[in-house]
Image (cartoon, coloured by chain):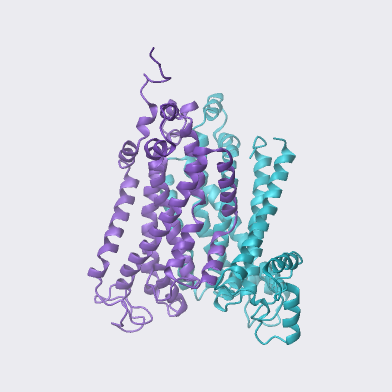
């Protein structure tokens, strides 16, 4: 006797949502490409920064608050240190802080989200309650308190940011996993006797992959922001060079009242450009995953019907 | 679920969250090793009587669990200890600081919301047009700049033209109430602008995507086919339904408001709660720090609760 499984003959509608097809789709958008280009350039600069810094980042090479010149493109800070070199080095450390904190946050968020969405029941209830509390408590204030109690250090900053930033990821992933859990192919593998671990790794993770990537890229922006905020409030390691501490030193040592905008602008613009890059990339992936956004009945250039993919049980 | 059950559930959740924050506060400041622990009585230059009173109130010579109960009792009565800095009760300091913060932050937030909704709706309605690209890109740009950067830039640009620090001109003596009000208003311009600029961008982007989602709904097509005028279609059919994510957004952005206002108050020397927290960190004024943390947490939780209730009013079908 042959056992016919439901939906066995129909091609999987989900296959188009796999990791690579979505990525391929996304990379055809100009915004995503621009974002990717920005992020790549920043990462490369961060990697080779010790090689291309024109001046020392620790010793004075010019006068205090010397304005930009051909020798010092971005001028000098309050200690006579070349700002261009500082921003390059600061980017390297800021990006390491941002990426590490994000990895911690995404790791916790994805684990909580998958466990909660996959197993449901009391696991879901307990994990989501915890998430709810973390969502409501004002994180930056808690970060300030923790950083103040523990003492300023870069690794504390990373841990604090990572451990407090995971909540939105957890919620997002949970919702996605919950709907994936009900898909026919997951039920089928389960019936065939696959272990939970196997199902999660082979069948759930690839489906939430693009969403996780988008979330990671967007979370980096938050992590870098939080680092600059904590550094500005003097809670980061004062000897570390990051974009946050560069701006903090400039503010602390009267760059504003001396009109030395060049001590602030490069670091601020660097943060902004990197964050715009991450944002464009992350949003493009997110939008690519949401076919509902492709249709607007108010569009000026006529209208088209929303594709059926986004409706009913197939809705993503 | 019945409406009243929902409301009760949210209220209980809020109360429990406050309790969790209280406990977290206790653990952070008194139990963790290396923390400032129970030094609430170590007010510099305090009279022995004050030290004794604090030791008795918070049971500093008693075991931890008893300290915890006493701490809860004292906190609920509004006794957060005495500030190390000015030897005033922390509670009084906090009340004063909040009083200064609220007008500035409220103005900034309302401006940011209005601007965000207007810009978001316009760019969603004219999707793909030049207006949309321009306003979305400008919003992303403002979203991308750190608050302290925008604040410092405004300071440098407007340094001479507008007052740059504090709430009042310290040298303006003998002015009438109206004069000092105008003076405060002038001092508010730069901080409020910074706050509104950093907050509006995220609002605009969220409103835009919420509107785009509703504009793709079938009932919009139906309404359009019926011949509903465009203006009404946008206002009554699309924006009404896009309100839900917008309310969530406002509640979620409270954290950003708090962060932004701390940094802004530091930059513009605004004597509010954020600056109080900052000074408390700098001067290791732990009673003030924990009091400020608790107070901000309670405020944020309360506003979240209000957002939940508004959400319920907008969409009574809600169950969780």
Residue positioned most to the top: A1
Q: Position of residue A38 (x, y in %)?
A: 31, 55
Q: Can residue B251 be seen in this view?
A: yes
Q: In which quarter of the image is residue A276?
A: bottom left
Nearest the camera: B229 or A133? Answer: A133
Q: Where is residue A207 in the image (x, y as percent from the top left)?
A: 39, 37
Q: How many labels does the image show?
A: 0
Q: Where is residue A123 in the image (x, y as percent from the top left)?
A: 55, 43
Compared with residue A260, is residue B314 higher up or lower down, i.e. above or below? above
Compared with residue A306, is residue A120 higher up or lower down, i.e. above or below? below
Compared with residue B302, is residue B284 higher up or lower down, i.e. above or below? below
* B145 relative position to B29: left or right: left
Residue positioned most to the left: A51
* A138 relative position to A86: left or right: right
Q: The purple chain is which one?
A: A
Compared with residue A164, is residue B217 higher up or lower down, i.e. above or below? above
Nearest the camera: B218 or B250? Answer: B250
Q: In which quarter of the image is the N terminus of chain A?
A: top left
Q: Can residue B193 be seen in this view?
A: no
Nearest the camera: A140 or B240? Answer: A140
Q: In which quarter of the image is residue A306?
A: top left
Q: The cyan chain is which one?
A: B
Name the residue: 49% across, 55% down. Answer: A165
């Amino acid at each position: 006797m042959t056992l016919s499984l439901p939906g066995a003959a129909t091609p999987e509608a989900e296959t188009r949502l796999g990791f690579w097809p979505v990525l391929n789709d996304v990379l055809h958008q100009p915004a995503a490409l621009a974002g990717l280009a920005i992020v790549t350039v920043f990462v490369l600069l961060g990697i080779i920064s010790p090689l291309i810094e024109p001046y020392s980042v620790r010793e004075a090479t010019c006068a205090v608050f010397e304005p930009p010149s051909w020798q010092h493109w971005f001028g000098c800070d309050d200690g006579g240190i070349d700002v261009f070199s500082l921003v390059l080095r600061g980017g390297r450390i800021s990006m390491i802080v941002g990426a590490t904190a994000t990895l911690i946050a995404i790791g916790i968020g994805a684990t909580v989200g998958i466990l909660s969405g996959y197993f449901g029941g009391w696991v879901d209830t307990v994990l989501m309650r915890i998430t709810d509390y973390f969502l409501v408590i004002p994180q930056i204030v808690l970060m300030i308190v923790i950083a103040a109690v523990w003492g300023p250090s870069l690794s504390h900053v990373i841990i604090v940011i990572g451990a407090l930033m995971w909540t939105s990821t957890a919620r997002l992933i949970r919702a996605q996993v919950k709907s994936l859990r009900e898909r026919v192919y997951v039920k089928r593998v389960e019936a065939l006797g696959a272990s939970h671990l196997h199902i999660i790794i082979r069948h759930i993770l690839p489906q939430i992959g693009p969403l996780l990537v988008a979330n990671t890229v967007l979370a980096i922006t938050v992590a870098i922001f939080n680092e600059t905020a904590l550094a500005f409030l003097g809670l980061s390691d004062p000897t570390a060079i990051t974009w946050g501490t560069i701006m903090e030193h400039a503010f602390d040592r009267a760059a504003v009242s001396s009109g030395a905008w060049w001590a602030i602008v490069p670091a601020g613009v660097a943060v902004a450009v990197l964050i715009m890059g991450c944002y464009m990339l992350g949003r493009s992936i997110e939008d690519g995953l949401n076919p509902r956004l492709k249709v607007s009945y108010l569009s000026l250039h006529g209208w088209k019907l929303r594709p059926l993919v986004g409706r009913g049980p197939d809705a993503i | 679920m019945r409406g009243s059950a929902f409301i009760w559930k949210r209220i209980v959740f809020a109360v429990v969250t406050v309790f969790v924050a209280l406990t977290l506060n206790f653990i952070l400041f008194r139990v963790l090793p290396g923390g400032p622990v129970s030094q609430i009585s170590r007010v510099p230059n305090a009279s022995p009587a004050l030290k004794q009173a604090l030791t008795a109130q918070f049971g500093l010579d008693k075991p931890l669990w008893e300290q915890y109960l006493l701490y809860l009792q004292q906190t609920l009565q509004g006794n957060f200890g005495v500030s190390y800095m000015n030897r005033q009760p922390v509670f009084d300091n906090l009340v004063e600081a909040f009083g200064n913060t609220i007008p500035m932050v409220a103005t900034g937030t309302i401006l940011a919301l209005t601007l965000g909704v207007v810009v978001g709706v316009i760019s969603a309605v004219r999707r793909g047009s030049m207006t949309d690209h321009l306003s979305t890109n400008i919003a992303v740009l403002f979203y991308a700049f750190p608050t302290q950067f925008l604040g410092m830039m405004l300071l440098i640009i407007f340094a001479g033209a507008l007052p740059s620090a504090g709430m009042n001109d310290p040298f303006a003596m003998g002015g009438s109430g109206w004069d000092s009000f105008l003076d405060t208003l002038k001092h508010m311009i730069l901080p409020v602008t910074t706050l509104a600029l950093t907050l509006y961008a995220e609002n605009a982007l969220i409103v835009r995507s919420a509107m785009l989602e509703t504009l793709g709904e079938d009932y919009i097509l139906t309404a359009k086919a019926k011949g509903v005028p465009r203006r009404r279609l946008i206002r009554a059919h699309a924006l009404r339904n896009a309100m839900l994510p917008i309310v969530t957004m406002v509640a979620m952005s409270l954290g950003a408001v708090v962060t932004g206002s701390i940094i802004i108050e530091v930059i513009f020397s605004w004597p509010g709660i954020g600056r109080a927290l900052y000074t408390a960190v700098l001067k290791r004024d732990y009673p003030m720090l924990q009091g400020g943390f608790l107070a901000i947490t309670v405020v944020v939780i309360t506003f979240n609760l209000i957002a939940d209730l508004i959400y319920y009013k907008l969409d009574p079908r809600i169950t969780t």
